[in-house]
Amino acid sequence: MNDVTLFRLYLLKALYLMVAVGLGLVVWPGVIHHTRPWELMEGVVQCMLASFGLLSALGLRYPLQMLPVLLWEMAWKTIWLLVVAMPLWLSGRMDQATWAMASDVLVVVIFPFVVPWSYLFKNYVSKSGDRWSRTTVAS
């Protein structure tokens, strides 16, 4: 943890707080008080967003340990922007609903500036992974 400055930790906590409060205000009321059964994908999306909000709240206490949650969020939003929104935009066929979704998803542009990339690389890329099988203890 000494690799990450206190300022960067506060930035991470601010990001987690923004996500947790935003999703808490927007998504959770609908999860708790939805008045009609959800369609399959609407239910999936709402439940995934609600769980992301909960995990972001946990990130307030453990900002470095919850980095994989931010990576997942960055990954799916970036993929969606590149695979769904950009082709529609480039072809001039982007409708109002897609514009609205794209504007919501574009918040991801701040994530790379907050993530402590050197810490992430050291602890999630170059560090040895957990073993895959039992090890025998030599006597």
Image (cartoon, rainbow, N blue to C red):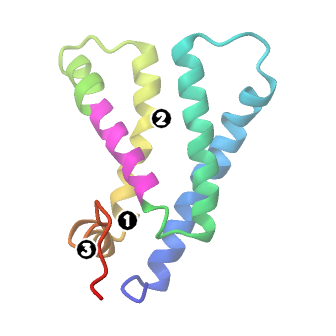
The rendered magenta stretch, by its main secondary structure, is classed as helix
Amino acid type, label 1: Val
| Crowd band around label 3 with a 10 angstrom C-alpha radius: few (<14), some (14–19), many (20+) | few
- Give residue 104's mark: 2
Task: Quickly name the residue at label 1.
Answer: 115
Q: Judging from the image, what secondary structure is the residue with disc 1 in?
A: loop
Magenta span? 68-81
For residue 97, side relative to residue 53 (left or right): left
Q: Quadrant of residue 136?
A: bottom left
Instruction: Check if mark 3's residue and mark 2's residue have beta carbons within 8 Å.
Output: no
Residue 75, placed above or below residue 119: above
For residue 2, side relative to residue 62 (left or right): left
Amino acid type, label 2: Asp
Task: Quickly name the residue at label 3.
Answer: 127
| Crowd band around label 1 with a 10 angstrom C-alpha radius: few (<14), some (14–19), many (20+) | many
Instruction: Check if mark 3's residue and mark 1's residue have beta carbons within 8 Å.
Output: no
Dot in front, 3 or 1: 3
Residue 100, how many percent across, how many down?
47, 24
Residue 70, how many percent across, how many down?
43, 54
Dot in front, 3 or 2: 3
Whole-number angstrom distance, CA of label 3 to CA of label 1: 18 Å
